[in-house]
Amino acid sequence: MASLAADGSDAAPPAPTATPTPAISVPNTPVSSLATEELSNPSGSPTRPNMVGDGQEFMPHPLNNLVSPLLTDMYQLTMAYAYWNAGRHEEHAVFELFFRKNPFEGEFTIFVGLDQVLAHLKNFHFSDSDINYIRQLLPNAKPEFFDYLANMDCSQITVSAVRDGTIVFPRTVLLKVEGPLAVGQLLETTLLNLVNYPSLICTNAARMRLAAQPKDRPDKKVILLEFGLRRAQGPDGGISASRYAVAGGFDGTSNVLDPMLDNV
């Protein structure tokens, strides 16, 4: 899987040597059984959003309705078709998600977004309208391929992951996705999208929290409030920024909608 790059780049490095995942939240757990799995999580701000590991059930669906199998790159579809056409689509494959360097020239990154990843996997399914649209994108594909897509889900996918909210370092494997080759291929872009920006925002918030705390007054309570909605990259960027700023240590947000969605 292309590397997570919290600096905005998602190009895969040449032959990287990734570090084994140090803390496994969902060890070899089929996606179909994730709904009731309860995980442990490092302690954090009591006002942070419900994240994987807070003793909460996994989210029934992603926060954003745009998160679907079509939220991917065109070449993922053409590669999936190539695998299917060659009879390799069911081959067992392992995809690993990691990053190459910490953002902001810092010393750490905070991994978040796992709850959205798992919600996407639980709901992964091409609708009839999705299939009709893909027929237009791939007019020369064999009809049987679209039947294959119509029946595709993540029931054969197994996920291992670092705990949500964990401090991680470059080349640490954050997510390991195992299962049929074509399914894993179609997950790549979406999973990068669901982890990359949230981890960037959460890490930046944690750095601000550390910088704001007076060194000579460690007991002093410093209130940090997120107020970026008006300058955010659209509605989704605003919701994500508010959500993961609180996850990174902020005390609240000016965003009226986000607390209703996240209970922060």
Image (cartoon, rainbow, N blue to C red):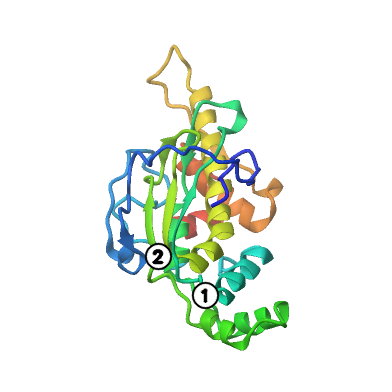
Q: Which mark is residue 87?
A: 1
Camera sees residue 218: yes
Q: Nearer the viewer, residue 30 or 18?
A: 18
Residue 109, percent across and down? 50, 35
Instruction: Determine whether, in the image, residue 261 is placed left or right of residue 36.
Output: right
Local crowd size for mark 1, using a 10 Å CA cut-off: few (<14), some (14–19), many (≥20): few
Residue 201 against residue 208 in the figure, above or below: below
What residue is shown at x 54% (from left), y 38% (from top)?
225
Q: Amino acid type of disc 2? A: Ile
Splitting the image into 4 quarters, where does residue 68 fall? Answer: bottom right
Q: Which residue is mark 2?
A: 157
What residue is shown at x 51% (from left), y 49% (from top)?
243
Extreme residue in the bottom direction: 143
**Element at label 2:** loop
Tally of numbered discs: 2
**Element at label 1:** loop
Residue 162, percent across and down? 38, 45
